[in-house]
Amino acid sequence: MEKAGETIPEIVLNTGHKMPLVGLGCAGQPLPPSEQLVSIFIDAMEIGYRHFDTAALYGTEEALGKAVAKALEIGLIKSRDELFITSKLWSTDADHDLVLPALKQTLGKLGLEYLDLYLIHWPLRLKQGTSVSNFTKDAILPFDMHGTWKAMEECSKLGLTKSIGLSNFTCEKISKLQESATILPAVNQVEMNVGWQQRKLVPFAKEKGIHISAWSPLGGYGTSWGSNAVMENPIIKNIADSRNKTVPQVALRWVYQQGASVIVKSFSKERMKQNLQIFDWELTKEEMDQILQIPQRRAPGTEALVDPTGPYKSLEEFWDGDI
Ligand SMILES: NC(=O)c1ccc[n+]([C@@H]2O[C@H](COP(=O)([O-])OP(=O)(O)OC[C@H]3O[C@@H](n4cnc5c(N)ncnc54)[C@H](OP(=O)(O)O)[C@@H]3O)[C@@H](O)[C@H]2O)c1
Ligand SMILES: *[C@@H]1O[C@H](CO)[C@@H](O)[C@H](O)[C@H]1NC(C)=O
Ligand SMILES: *[C@@H]1O[C@H](CO)[C@@H](O)[C@H](O)[C@H]1NC(C)=O
Ligand SMILES: CC(=O)N[C@H]1CO[C@H](CO)[C@@H](O)[C@@H]1O
């Protein structure tokens, strides 16, 4: 069969389902108007993207759903199974009885019968009605990780999602989850890039058979939460120049060579294409060693979630010391 764009390698998750190793990030601030967003997602499918990463929080589920319907209508894809769609449980719904209704709402917005992957967005519960914009520390409630995961397992048994997983979980939190889990998480989606390489989590997850997906692989360049730590890193710039690649290509290829999947956001057609040109060349051992020299730092942002009187009293406690 002839394919319109680039062919993206896939990995088999511990559930037996395949996932393309590059997914398009569907978060943006500010978002373009809905109609424009729909055509951006259709462009992405034309270019070859088959994996889309959205969340209840992002406000892009409806536009993505419309793009899927349109792609089927115009024959860009033959069936919904050709796509891999991820969404995430927002923290206001992170409690046992709230999970199924939240997933049904997500499916309703996407106009789909099932997700490929449903993730717990943060290891955290927030009071219902809390939005990110007017969020205060007293909105943080104790998080029943075991009950929430049990409900995620129920959703997968109902066939509403093929795989279930986590986001922003540390090694310690995964181990704690395993005490009661009957289904192992398929994926843990975390901040991962050359400036925060997740050196503790990557080998831990590999040993457990949990796949790591990297959000902000370009350091969230130009976003309100991101930085220029990746895009303006001199080591990456040097490698890019000497290899006749762009800085983003080197940064994304590094993630791919770690065995992780790349969740990269671009709403520009040219940059979407550029970000897929990472499969027909590789970084040498020497270049990988140079990248190991890059100083390591997590993106800021978690400070707002810790409070001396809250469930997480310090950043140390939130990240279980891995900071
Ligand atoms: N699980 C979580 O908690 C979590 C947290 C954050 C993000 N995510 C997911 O991960 C996705 C990606 O993360 P992110 O959006 O933070 O950051 P990112 O993918 O590291 O960077 C995105 C930024 O880089 C720009 N960009 C992309 N390709 C480029 C290129 N080739 N050259 C120059 N600039 C380029 C984009 O602008 P243009 O659009 O203008 O190209 C955008 O401003 C999100 O969209 C979301 O799906 C998940
Ligand atoms: C926070 O914002 C949301 C959405 O904008 C709103 O529904 C809610 O009432 C607000 N909550 C508070 C405490 O102001
Ligand atoms: C560098 O890369 C560009 C874009 O892929 C290509 O057009 C050009 O021929 C390359 N130059 C060299 C010297 O390889
Ligand atoms: C709790 C925490 O640090 N969360 C990170 C994971 O996801 C959000 C974005 O969805 C990031 O902004 C946070 O830094």
Image (cartoon, helix red, strand yellow):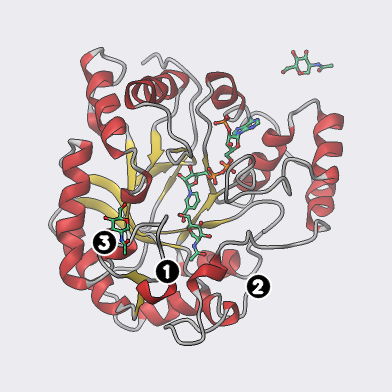
- Residue flagged by tag 3: what amino acid is it? Gly
Q: Residue at x 65, y 28 (%)?
A: 280
Up/down of 312 relative to 261, above or below: below
Q: Quadrant of ligand 3?
A: top right
Q: Residue at x 53, y 64 (%)?
A: 206
Q: Are marks 1 and 3 in contact (CB under 8 Å)?
A: no
Would you say the beta carbon of the disc 1 residue lies within 8 angstroms of ligand 2? yes
**Distance from Cα at disc 2 to Cα at disc 3:** 30 Å
Q: Is residue 267 left or right of residue 111?
A: right
Q: Residue at x 35, y 50 (%)?
A: 57
The quadrant of the picture occupied by the C terminus is: bottom right
Q: How many marks?
A: 3
Q: Which residue is mark 1?
A: 136
Q: Which mark is residue 323?
A: 2
Q: Which residue is mark 3?
A: 129
Q: CA distance from mark 1 to mark 2?
A: 23 Å
